Each structure stands twice: as structure tokens, then as C-alpha cells.
Amino acid sequence: MDALARRLAESHPLPHAVLVDCARRAIASGVPEPGEEAGRLAVLFSRSLVGDVINATGVLLHTNLGRAPLPLRTSGRATNLEFDAESGARGSRHTAVSSLVSVLTGAEAAVVVNNNAAAVMLVLAALASGRGVAVSRGESVEIGGGFRIPDVMEQSGAQLVDVGTTNRTRLSDYEKAVASTRHDIALVMKIHPSNFSVEGFVSSVPVAELAGVGVPVVADIGSGLLDSTCPWLHGRMPAVPQFLAAEPAARQALADGAGLVTFSGDKLLGGPQCGIIAGRADLVAACASHPLMRALRPGGHTLQLLQSALMSFADRTVCDDIPFWRMLSVPVDELRARALAVVKTAGRGSVTDTTALVGAGSAPGTSLPSVAVALDGDVTARLRALPVPVVARVDRNVTLLDLRTVDPADDHAVAGAVRTL
Ligand SMILES: *Cc1c(COP(=O)(O)O)cnc(C)c1O
């Protein structure tokens, strides 16, 4: 085993202990050529390590590719995560992001947890455990990866009270549930159906109307658009894209009277994976002091990344600083020029107009104009086999490398990948 591991080390730069494990498993498998098998296992291990890929799929927030991409920049020093440098006493890890979220959305306060699923769970556990939560039947949704509203509700200890019907829910449906002594309704929860749309004979009740029902309204807006007017896009895009104007936004939901909003950090916000609970100070405080908070709180790196993303929104520099907003706002002409340059450098392929998608279950049915480098046949497996895998898509036996989701700094890598085919 040791000899085999040492031989593997010549072609696989992996820790000795990992190579010994590959050798052990290869020998135990009883194949006639354990050396070959061990090499195969070493390659499989290398390729399973979390690392960079080039996203040329045209899906801006690709669920399988880490959703919103974000560069990691830390000095590696200790931080004032829970230290108040003013007083020298213990501080809160939430202070800075809470102030920033307030500035950006009008919320009185905010806390951050590991993802939006955790945010919804914590809100329900802290504010409605053992009590009822009214949810429209049309919003009792599954977000994917097992996030199903009835199940989350059950786990939190709150009781789901269905109101209305699948296609139509009226204000009176909520009012009836709240007035009924049978339910003891603590909250009304409005869940954005992020990943599907229903058309036809449908109606739902906006937050502004729900705000008068007598219990706090919690709006799970999902995608994390901070403000539907997108002031950070002024001067960068001719108009706010249609799909963004249709997304529920934190500032508007709170202004309409939502007691709390919950949203993901790594969808339209373009930040790290996390979930944000923002709104009324008393409701946020109840969440922050719940015992689950300790289990759901994010680490310092996450908070630093979120802080820097929020600073970019405040500075209105998101189109330069945050990859998602850069991808969204880059003009098509610029993409076409880049595609032409890639084709020229690679010496093969052609330039074609295409459409990109927002992804992450956000804005279903909307597409963005884009430009791709087109290659004959399906060459996606060969592109994925490169040291930095390039992930592309296939349409009618043509491989498309969509440049909207590629960082311009990676264009040379894409050209190099195409040339090697
Ligand atoms: C995405 C989404 C969630 C889950 O958020 P995660 O951050 O992935 O946990 C919950 N609710 C809505 C409405 C969503 O869009």
C-alpha cells in the first residue's frame, strides 16, 4: 500500500494520507490492476474538492455552482466580530450589518443567520411556537432542496393555518382566521412563490392590505432585492429590468407594513450564503434572543462578506464590486465584442445571440439578452474535464459558452479552453 501511495504521489499532488486511502481501497476492491484503480480514485478525489469553475452556462445564480459568486478577501487577522473597540467590552456580531440593512431598507433592526430557510425557521420558532400562522394555500410552497413551508412550520413548533384556495385568497380569508378563537393566530406569513408562476383566475393579498389584520405580517420575500427602485443601477442601466420591478423588495414590503421580512444573502443581493431577518426592533430582538439563534448564527467570514456587499449597495458601486450585479448590468454590445475576441484568440467557434437566466429559482420565466461562443456538437464533457472546469450548455447539438456569466478576467481562460478542444 505504501509503495503504491508513493508511486501515486508522482502524478497526484495530494496528502500522503489521502493517497494511502486510495491505495487501500484499490487493493481491497480486488481489481487486477490496483495501480490504475488507485489513480482513478485519486483523480475522483481531486475533482471532488471544492474549487473554482468557470460558469459559462448563462445562469447568473446557478444553484449547482454556488449561487452568487463572490471573491473572498480577508487578511487572516483576528477581527472585532464580538468586540466593541470603543468600550473594550463584548460586542455583537450583528451591529454593523444591522445598521447597514437599516440604511438600505428602512428596517429598524436586522439579524443574520445561515440561510433564508434558517431565517424562516427562527422567526416561526421565536414568534409563533405553539400558536397558529396563517398562510395562503397558494403560498404553501416548496422552494427546492426540501424547503417546504408545511414541514418548516411543523419543525418550528408553529401550527400552519391554511387560508383561501390554491388560486385565490382574499383579505377576508385572513381576517376570518385571525378572528377565530380556534386558531390563536400569532402571525400572518406571506411567502413569495419564487420559483413558479400561476396564471389565470388568480388573486392574492398584498402586504399593504394584510398589515391591518391585527397580527404582525412576516413577508418571506426570498430573493433579497433590497429596494425595487434599484437606486444603485441609476446611470448603469437604461432602466430597471422588468423582472426586478416585479420582485418583492425589502424596503417596499416594510414600508407597506410588514413587521419582518426574511431573505437570502446569495440570490439577488449577490452576497454570501446567509439569511437576513429585518424589520421591527422588538420582533428582531425576539428572534435574536431565541436559543436557536446560537445554532443558526453565521461565522465571521460570512458577516464580513455580507458587510462588504451591503457597503457596495450603500456606495452604489454594486455594478463594479458584486459579480451578480456586474453580470446583470453588462451591455450586450460589450458581450458581443468579448465573444468576437474569444473566437479570434481560440481560432474556432462562432458568435451567437442567446438568452441568459437569472437562476436560483428567482424570476421564473424571465430571460436576459446575451451573447455566446458557439461550438459544433456537444463538447461539454471535455470542457468540464479541464483543470479549471468550464461549465457550458448545449442547445440542439451546439455547445454555447455564454459570456454574461463569465468574468471578463476569465475570457482568456475560456479562449484557451476552446483552443485545446
Ligand atoms: C430561496 C428561498 C428560500 C430559501 O432560502 P435559502 O437561502 O436557500 O435557505 C426561502 N423562501 C423563499 C421565498 C425563497 O425564494
Image (tube, helix red, strand yellow):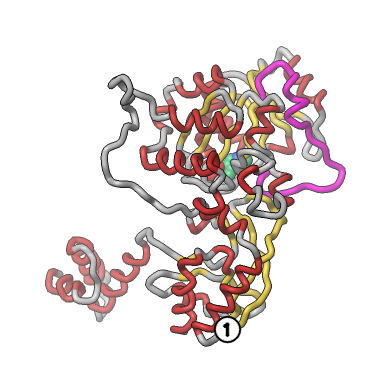
Residue 94 rendering spot, x and y as whole percentages: 43, 29
- The amino acid type of the residue labelled 1 equals Gly
In depth, the one of 303 and 289 nearer the eye is 303
Which residue corresponds to the image point at 42% horizontal and 53% vertical from the top-left?
71
Residue 279 rendering spot, x and y as whole percentages: 59, 26
Which residue in the rendered view is the most extreme toward the left? 3
Instruction: Give the side of residue 25 with respect to residue 258, left or right.
Output: left
Residue 397, quarter of picture: bottom right
Which residue in the rendered view is the most extreme toward the right? 201
Residue 80 rendering spot, x and y as whole percentages: 32, 32
Which element is circle 1 on? Answer: loop
* Span highlighted in magenta in the image: 193-217
Which residue corresponds to the image point at 37% horizontal and 62% vertical from the top-left?
48
Instruction: Give the side of residue 249 with respect to residue 80, left or right.
Output: right
Which residue corresponds to the image point at 50% horizontal and 20% vertical from the top-left?
285
Q: Which residue is tagged 1?
A: 349
Q: Predominant secondary structure in magenta? A: loop
Is 247 one of the magenta-colored residues? Answer: no
Which residue corresponds to the image point at 69% horizontal and 33% vertical from the top-left?
252
Callout 1 crowding tier (Cα within 10 Å): few <14, some 14–19, many ≥20: many
Q: Can see residue 147?
A: no
Residue 220, above or below 200: above
